[in-house]
Amino acid sequence: MSISWITVGTPLPSGPMRIAVSPLGVAAVDYNGGEGAAREPLCTDPAKIAAVTGRIGEYLGGRRRELGLPIDWSTSSGPHRTVLRTLLAEVPYGSTITYGELAARSGVFEDVSEPGLAARTVGQMMAANPFALLVPCHRVVAADGIGGFGGGRVGIEVKRWLLTLEGVLDPTLDWNGPG
């Protein structure tokens, strides 16, 4: 399958994002927008570029609550896909869910008896979410706080920024989001 990339400038602490698109939709999202750019084919389809950049810009600008971009689910499978689809369907803009609650709602972990294993596994699944932002893994939090987010300190700042944008967290004095 043919995949090409679009770079989208963002106000996020991580900088620009890279979005992989295929004929079926968005195939991957990378918050580290500059890395690997020279090796990957660039998208030349004006309609795809306009849709991706426009909708992400509107979302990050506080003018859109759902991205509404098609997703190419072929890059995920099995339980991971089930958990991601559950997250997308059941956790709307401005709300959060814990790793354990998402594990329970997905139905994937019904036979897991070890305490905490399902929640930890969902945490690993969120870290490996190929559709970040489109499938809002930033809305999945720990039972006792914000939880983790890929990319270390910058990743946590991206998660805080997105949760602030959605009204889950109060803005801090240094928040650079939409008014």
Image (spheres, helix red, strand yellow):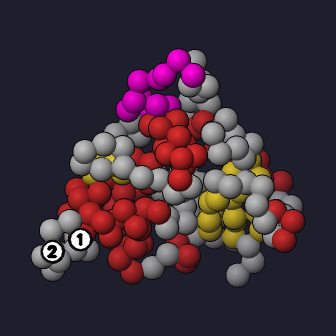
Image: 144 above or below 7: above
Is residue 30 rendered to the left or right of residue 126?
A: right
Instruction: Classify mark 2: helix, strand or loop.
Output: loop
Q: Amino acid at mark 2?
A: Glu
**Between residues 62 and 142, which one lies in front from this camera angle?**
142
Q: Position of residue 70 (x, y in %)?
A: 58, 60
Nearer-the-camera pick, 68 or 34: 34
- As measured in the structure, the alpha-carbon distance from the residue carrying label 2 to the one carrying label 1 is 6 Å
The residue located at (40%, 67%) in the rendering is: 124
- Does dot 1 land on a helix, a strand or a loop? helix
Identify whether 37 is placed above or below 91. Answer: below
Q: Is residue 12 magenta?
A: no
Q: Amino acid at mark 1?
A: Leu
Confirm or deny contact between disc 2 and disc 1 (CB under 8 A). yes
Asked if one can make out residue 51 in the rendered structure from this viewpoint, the answer is no
**From which residue to which does the magenta span run?**
164-174
42 left or right, relative to 155: right
Mark number displayed over residue 114: 2
Residue 117 is tagged as: 1
Give coordinates of residue 101: x percent, y percent. 22, 56
